[in-house]
Image (cartoon, rainbow, N blue to C red):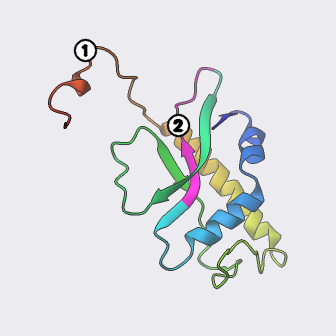
């Protein structure tokens, strides 16, 4: 887990660099991918803009509506296959060197999505004694 800041973009970029974005987007583009790779926002930004972020994976079958985090995954540009989907690692950017502006543009867009998702995220308050969410049967 890393503390980053919505007002200091470089904190997010240093934690999740372009190489990580290319790798994860390649993994996410595999035809039968059951797990998406990206970033999980663990907290809302505080008054100074700081929030907690971690590299994460999310199973496509998981329902994320009631989770206390926000998952943002990297995607590729559907009009430009800039990585080799046949590679098991998929991290090798095939055309990235031919068209670095496109890859860098997608990366900038992804970081923008992370920042916006952190701004828009609504997290439930911490559960405390007597909390309504703790009432009722919880298994056992």
Mark yes or no: residue 76 visible: no
Mark 2 crowd level (few <14, some 14–19, many ≥20, 10 Å Cα): many
The earlier-in-sequence mark between 2 and 1 is: 2
Q: Is residue 129 above or below residue 63?
A: above
On-image quarter of the C terminus: top left
Q: Horizontal and vertical percent for residue 107? A: 70, 59
The quarter holding residue 89 reads: bottom right
Is 40 magenta? The answer is yes
Query: Disc 2 designates what residue?
Result: 42
Query: Which residue is nearer to you in this view: 44 or 2?
Result: 2
Looking at the image, which residue is at 74% across and 35% down? 8
Query: Which residue is nearer to you in this view: 62 or 4?
Result: 62
Looking at the image, which residue is at 56% across and 43% down? 116
User: What range is drawn magenta here?
Assistant: 37-47
Q: Is residue 76 above or below residue 40?
A: below
Q: Horizontal and vertical percent for residue 91? A: 71, 71
Mark 1 crowd level (few <14, some 14–19, many ≥20, 10 Å Cα): few
Residue 126 in the figure: left or right of residue 112: left
Query: Disc 1 designates what residue?
Result: 130
Assign a secondary structure to mark 1: loop
Mark yes or no: residue 132 visible: yes
Looking at the image, which residue is at 64% across and 79% down? 88
Report the Cα–Cα distance between label 2 and label 1.
Answer: 24 Å
Q: How many marks?
A: 2
Is 10 magenta? The answer is no
Residue 137 in the figure: left or right of residue 21: left
């Amino acid at each position: 887990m890393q503390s980053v800041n919505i007002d200091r973009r470089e904190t997010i970029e240093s934690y999740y660099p372009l190489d990580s974005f290319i790798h994860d987007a390649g993994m996410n583009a595999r035809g039968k991918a059951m797990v998406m790779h990206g970033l999980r926002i663990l907290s809302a930004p505080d008054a100074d803009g700081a929030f907690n972020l971690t590299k994460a994976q999310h199973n496509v079958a998981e329902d994320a509506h009631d989770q206390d985090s926000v998952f943002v995954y990297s995607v590729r540009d559907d009009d430009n296959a800039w990585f080799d989907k046949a590679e098991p690692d998929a991290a090798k950017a095939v055309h990235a060197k031919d068209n670095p502006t496109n890859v860098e543009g997608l990366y900038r867009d992804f970081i923008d999505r992370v920042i916006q998702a952190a701004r828009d995220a609504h997290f439930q308050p911490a559960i405390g004694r007597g909390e309504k969410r703790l009432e009722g049967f919880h298994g056992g």
